[in-house]
Image (cartoon, rainbow, N blue to C red):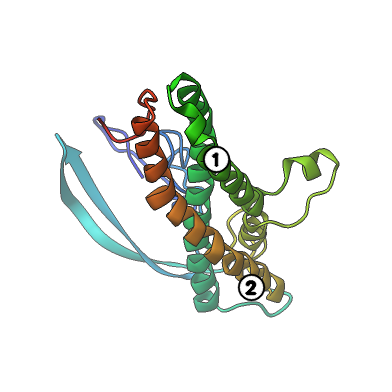
Amino acid sequence: MTAANKKGVHRIAWNLRHATQVAITDEKSGANPDRPSGAYAVPGTYSATLNSRVNGMTSEIAGPVSFDLVRITEQALPGSTPAEATAFQRQVADAQTAVSAANTTVADLTAKLKLYRMAIDRASGGATLEGQYNMIRAEVQALDEALTGSNAARRKGTTPATITSRVNYAARSGSTTYDPTTYGPTTQSHQQLGWAMEAFVDVRGRLSVLTGATVPAFENAMESAGAPWVKGADLR
């Protein structure tokens, strides 16, 4: 959190949320750093430290000062302990980081496919690249469907559960990311997160092979076929 860099006494309030762990894709990712949008903090002991940053150098001015975050209402029904809620929040945060990074990577590959298409059409040996191109395109589409669902199904009004939707459900229902619930994760919260990450193991492995081996090999083949350089490829 940042405070005003002016003379006088200034006050800044924490909104009781942690920083979001969604992948950073541009300068707008995570919105306002002074209004964290991650999970709500659970009851417990926290600390605050005041630092100054001048010309890229950070120095401590005061702190750390400890304070206790306590419940202001009594629960009508038994819920998770603060330790259990915190552990689940960490699992959800890790899942959000991994899945949002995969979604961004797939989106980038989808955009790159359009550039590949243009490059192939301009290559003297472009016909030799069609098989590899179609294989990569099919794999990208399959990974996108596993992560976010089928566009055709959504247009028909059906919304089957996907890896992303399951992680989002876990965040909404059990990690207090969106609503200040005090009960913590439910059995269904754990189930949805577990199913999502179980399916994500395969997606992450395939995506790693695609970006680490298949795409670089294809870009080398494009160069050999006389295709022009494509943004994001290794420099020639």
The residue located at (58%, 56%) in the rendering is 177
In the picture, residue 229 is in which quadrant? top left
The residue located at (67%, 63%) in the rendering is 173
Does 176 sit left or right of 2 as displayed? right
In the picture, residue 231 is in which quadrant? top left
- Residue 90: tell me if it is visible: yes
Screen quadrant of the N terminus: top left
User: Element type at marker 2?
Assistant: helix
The residue located at (53%, 54%) in the rendering is 99
Is 81 or 147 nearer to us in this picture?
147
In the picture, residue 75 is in which quadrant? bottom right
Q: For marks 2 and 1, give the CA distance.
A: 42 Å
Does 31 sit left or right of 230 as displayed? right
The amino acid beneath tag 2 is His
Is 141 or 131 nearer to us in this picture?
131
The earlier-in-sequence mark between 2 and 1 is 1
Circle 2 or circle 1, nearest the eye: 1
Q: Is residue 235 above or below residue 206?
A: above
Is 84 or 120 nearer to us in this picture?
120
The residue located at (47%, 49%) in the rendering is 101
Residue 32 image point, x, y percent: 45, 38
Is 156 or 115 nearer to us in this picture?
115
| Label 2 crowd (10 A; few <14 / some 14-19 / many >=20) | some
Q: Which residue corresponds to mark 2?
A: 190
Does 61 sit left or right of 233 as displayed? left
Residue 28 image point, x, y percent: 45, 34
Q: In this view, does 56 lie above or below 101?
A: above
Q: Which residue corresponds to mark 1?
A: 131
